[in-house]
Amino acid sequence: MFNEKYKLHPISAIINFIKVLKDMILPFIVVVTVNGFGGSRDSDGWPSFITYSIYAVVLIFLLVSGIVKWKRFRYWFEDGELRIEYGLFVKKMRYIPFERIQSLNYTEGIFHRPFGLVKVKVETAGGGPTEEADAVLTAITKDAAEQIKREMIQTKSKQPGELNEAIQHEVVLTEEARPIFTMSIKDLIVLASTSGGVGVFFSGLAVFAAQFSNIIPYEMIYDEIVVFIRFGALIIVLGVFFVLLVAWVVSVFLTLINYYNFTISIEDNEIVITRGLLEKKKITLPLSRIQGVRVVENPFRQLIGYASIIVDSAGGSLEEKDEKIRLLPLVKKTKIHSVLEQIFLDLDLEPNFITVPKRSRKFFYRLDFLWIIPVSTTIIYFFYPFGLLSLILLPLSYIFGMWQQRTAGYAVNGPHLVMRYRNLSKVTIWMEKKRIQSMTERMTFFQKRKNVSSIITTIKSGVSGSTAIVPHLDKADAERLINWYQPTKSNTIQKEKEQPIV
């Protein structure tokens, strides 16, 4: 069985063709449009025939390329590894030890579901050096995907031969675990309304317009806008409102498609996240891979009682940005504890925070004044008297600094550290001591005069790191955190005893 090589499903050829076509569709449309959908015509029509022939040859080449990728792709299991072979002129081999595999993520697109197929992404602890996953099996049957997981568990458990009944129960791909959280339609609408989806819509519209800048009649549009303005400000306001309404509806629609039936469940010490309507995704995240848990509240969501929960994960591919996974894209704050306590059993979800002292208050707004004052002065000079409105930035900066100062704090509960701070959004992060990569105390000359300092921690997140900072803590509290993070004397002596004698 270990030497048997397996192929992908033939639908992989079509999927590869569509993927390449999707990446080229925008420049392809631009080329076709600029060339007048077929070029100039003479009496015989030959230029148009040649142009369309070139388009057809390009499409056929892309289709043949997808077929070749499917024909040359093989995978098999050997010596505790998932081995992959691919390439036409240059044969490439990839060996992935099963013990390094952290998760198998499944996706069911519109081409997979009719045939009962899934796309499998293999993620390892360190992640790939590129922006792609360590391995992607474009289209295989669910039984074949189940077989990969069986081989992985068998290798990790080091049990040769047939799997016992307990392990066989672990490898079932169907979602038998009890769901912990399911996002409602109401929450999806709130998520779309309070996210950057509308901004993404307008950004995409701007990119699209830039691609067709040569053929869009801007002068004609400008003349129409001038005529439109003459009808009055009310019509302009109604027009802007209509455009924003359409953008919001599109944002809600896309969010509903991407996060439809968003469900979290726990299975085999893994968090299983499923979501999607047209393309159903199933992401598995081992609990051992989680480095930190963040509760993020932007000002508007905090006002209406909602928050997002993000987990920092070691490993993962840059393509999927698995280093920061939205465990809960949106959840009522009253439900956060009930969800997290089912996933992370040892977290103190109601810590007693030690806040920053009042004497450090001015550090939160003083630096802002350094740039606000000259900017306001310049605006007032050139735009007086309306430039006087820029002075409102001073009290706003002071109020925001007070907001940051009242938010910042920390709590220690055994091996866990909880840090709370605010940039614009309020962030509360839980970290385990052994997961913290580094802890730094930073003190400037002005902080030293007030006997305060800042604590910066770094945890592993993806292929890099993620930092959290509690600024302007009391010096004694900062030293207490440093002492807590440093290894104890008994542990240091034990490690020295374990060192080999040379």
Image (cartoon, rainbow, N blue to C red):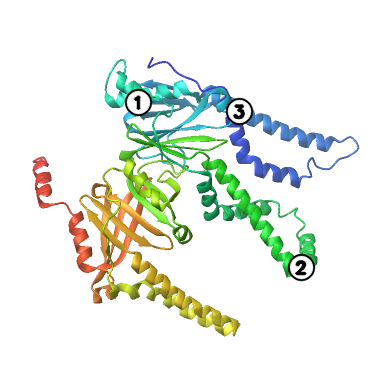
Ranked by sequence position, the earlier of labels 3 and 2 is 3
The kind of secondary structure element at disc 3 is helix
User: From the viewer's perspective, is residue 421 above or below residue 77?
Assistant: below
Depth check, mark 3 against mark 2: the one in front is 2
Question: Horizontal and vertical percent for residue 497?
Answer: 8, 43
Q: Which residue is drawn at 37% across and 41% down?
A: 315
Residue ranking furthest to the right: 43
In front of the other: 70 or 387: 387
Count residues near mark 3 (Cα–Cα under 10 Å), then give few for <14, some for 14-19, many for 20+. some
Q: Residue at x 24, y 77 (%)?
A: 449
Do residues under tags 3 and 2 come within 8 Å of each other at their CB atoms? no
Which residue position holds label 3? 14
Ranked by sequence position, the earlier of labels 1 and 2 is 1
The residue under label 2 is which amino acid type? Ile
Question: Horizontal and vertical percent for residue 184?
Answer: 50, 43
The kind of secondary structure element at disc 2 is helix
User: From the viewer's perspective, is residue 165 above or below residue 461?
Assistant: above
Question: Horizontal and vertical percent for residue 37?
Answer: 78, 42
Q: Can residue 268 be seen in this view?
A: yes
Q: How far apart are marks 3 and 2 (CA)?
A: 50 Å
Count residues near mark 2 (Cα–Cα under 10 Å), then give few for <14, some for 14-19, many for 20+. few
Which residue position holds label 1? 170
Which residue position holds label 2? 229
The residue under label 1 is which amino acid type? Glu
In front of the other: 101 or 30: 101
